[in-house]
Amino acid sequence: MASIKEKIGYALGDAAAGGITWKIMSIAFPFFFTNVFGLSLGDTAALMLIARMFDVFTDPIMGSLADRTQSKWGTYRPWLIFGSIPFGIIFALLLFTPELDPEGKRIYAYTLYLLMMAVYTAVNVPYGSLLGVMTEDDNEKNEFSSYRMVGAYAMGFITLLSFPYLQKFVGGSDAHQYAVLGAGFGILAAAMTLACGLMTKERVKMVRAEKFSFKQFIDLFKNGPWLILTSIGICTNFFNGFRYAVAAYIFQYCMGGDITVSSLIINYTVFMAFGEVTCMIFGGLSPKFTSLIGSKRMAFIWASVICLILSVAFYFVPMSPSSIWWMIALVVLTSIGVGLYSPLLWSMYADVADYATEKFGTSSTGLIFSSGTMAQKFGGAVSGSLIALLLGLAGATMLKDEMGNESIDPASVTESVRTMIWALFSLFPAAIALLMGALAFIYPIKK
């Protein structure tokens, strides 16, 4: 029986990866690269797509490598322990804007982004795989997964809510603010990742395939539940990817900038932080909701329906600062669905890993869980790139300053561009919610 301390330790891993690094990469990076760092829309789209698509192929390799690791710290924990420091350093460097010409900046951004994706893989694939070896009890897996999501969303709330206030505290140029916050959040992410590796235990003895074989990769495509669940995972990250990445553009171009209500500064990070609190609460309630519904599959379907209906509703909210509380209310209500399905996804990966062990005779836990990280990066890559591409198609153009740096030309932000931004936050995610609910309906494992 795992202790509360260990469950909190496990939660720290996703508080670092999901609540700090991935949250900032998802919500701030498209805006940071186009409006602060100085990349064009095309370069930003290509950067996010190429770097993360590269990791779509490296994640399964990392999963297979992690499955074969043997050390006194276990199979998966050493990757967290020894990967924590590079994880924090590279994240900090990625938010630093060097004084280089446009070509030098392009090379810097591509190099650091590729390195960040690589170290994220080296830490996060083993972290996810830990769930499969900490306990054999299915209910306890649900609890670990729930703690994980509460940790991620609680830290996400702190990160997003504090971001504009920390920017104001740091002062100076936007580039200086992002660099300082990158260093601070990088140190915090490294410390949390290290704590996770030290506070958790691996109890389940794996049926290990000692030699590398492409048969494991071939077996994945014979695993029907894995194929469906990976498709669902891609959909969930499309859903979140569109909403988080486009939030900055909503405030910049649809709301006319930050909104101040009394002493509360509401910008794009604070706006999404309201949803993080809801996700944290309902992530904790997800096991009880699943017990009430009767199965993970049906609980996931109902969560998808919530996301679908409320995303459509957001499209009909007037595009005006006076509608801010209606916008926040719908973000909060949509996040109920996100909070309910997020722990379910990782618990379902554990079920697929157990199914694979029974069907094929050897454990491929790391390889199975790597597909969750792969789906995360694929969804984030394509959604981030599509946002830049679709804004360009809607009419947004770039403006160069005297240094050759580019940012979106405010004069090109017409009504069609603003409508596209609004749809990217509402109608596009709604269509994805419909698809992920349909996929969950045909998912065959009914635990």
Image: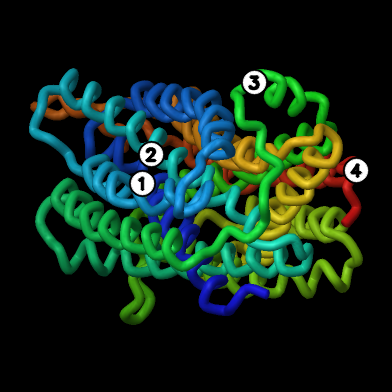
Three-letter amino acid code of the residue under disc 4: Pro
In the figure, residue 163 lies in which quadrant? bottom left
Q: Position of residue 237 (x, y in %)?
A: 60, 43
In the rendering, which numbered label is found on residue 83? 1
Q: Residue at x 52, y 77 (%)?
A: 5
Which badge, 2 or 3, is on the more N-terminal residue? Answer: 2
Q: Nearer the viewer, residue 82 or 266?
A: 82
Separation of residues labelled 4 and 3 (CA atoms): 27 Å
In the rendering, which numbered label is found on residue 213? 3
- Foreground label between 4 and 3: 3
Q: Residue at x 48, y 69 (%)?
A: 9
Q: Which residue is mark 2?
A: 119
Three-letter amino acid code of the residue under disc 1: Gly
Residues at discs 4 and 1 in contact (Cβ within 8 Å): no
Residues at discs 4 and 3 in contact (Cβ within 8 Å): no
Is the C terminus in the top left, top right, bottom left or bottom right quadrant? Answer: bottom right
Q: Position of residue 42 (x, y in %)?
A: 38, 22
Which badge, 4 or 1, is on the more N-terminal residue? Answer: 1
Left or right, 79 with respect to 442, comes to: left
In the rendering, which numbered label is found on residue 169? none
Q: Residue at x 38, y 53 (%)?
A: 81
- Foreground label between 2 and 1: 1
